[in-house]
Image (tube, grey):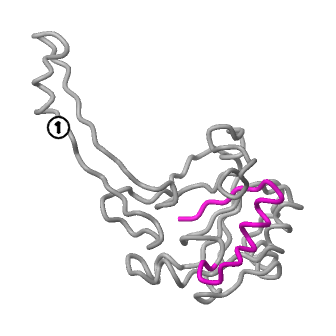
Amino acid sequence: MGRHIIDLSMEIESGMVANRDFSGNIFVPLVSHKESEKFQAGTPEDPFLSAWNYIGMTEHTGTHVDGFFHMDPLGLGIDQMPLDMFFGKAVCLDLTGIPPGGTITVADVEEAQKRCGVEIDGHIVLFATGHHRRFFPGDEVLTRNPEISAEVVHWLYRHGSRAHGVEGPSTDILSKKTFPSHRACRDLKVIHYPQ
């Protein structure tokens, strides 16, 4: 069985959907290949042309990882965390039955695990809730996401999972301001991928 790398990242672009509490993101082309001719790089028979852009954004825009430092002032920064936390075997669980603003429970995860026929054992677990399909690119994509219960984070940890991901702005419902999933990840040293 071959291995595949699947990129689930949202495209970074100017004005992309972002939490209203964060500064807006900026993506600006700075120098085109044509404009780079003025630097007269390379050789006359083989000029070196280049292009580059300016990107200004909070790291909590689009697809991202909540590293340990994000939730713990003594936690490791993303650049200090072990690389093996960010890749490995993965499973995507179908949780499209969870309603907007609902809570993903251990029972939901166990049932989804049975339906897909994969026993979670050290997997990166991705939760497909249909949230993106329902609400993107509207503002509701930022406010109607389901949340992952702290009990699910603990269950995943007991099954060897050190990373999980959701198709929404957070693993918690931001308006509740209690962040049970984030706090469980902080305490267990687990990472999660919001999108």
Q: Which residues are magenta?
A: 173-195
Give the image quarter of residue 91: bottom right
Please tell me how crowded label 1 is: few (under 14), some (14-19), or many (20+) other residues with Cα within 10 Å. few
- Give above or below for 89 relative to 193: above
Judged left or right of residue 109, residue 129 is left
Judged left or right of residue 112, residue 127 is left
190 in magenta = yes
Dot 1: what SS? loop
**View extreme (right): residue:** 158
Percent of width and height locating residue 194 = 58, 64
Judged left or right of residue 149, residue 47 is left
Which residue is label 1 attached to?
A: 32
**View extreme (front): residue:** 73
Percent of width and height locating residue 74 = 75, 47
> Looking at the image, which is closer to me, 116 or 53?
53
Query: Looking at the picture, which amino acid does disc 1 mark?
Result: Ser
**Residue lying at 65% horizontally and 55% vertically, measured from the top left:** 70
4 in magenta = no
**Residue lying at 81% horizontally and 64% vertically, measured from the top left:** 156
> Looking at the image, which is closer to me, 68 or 113?
68
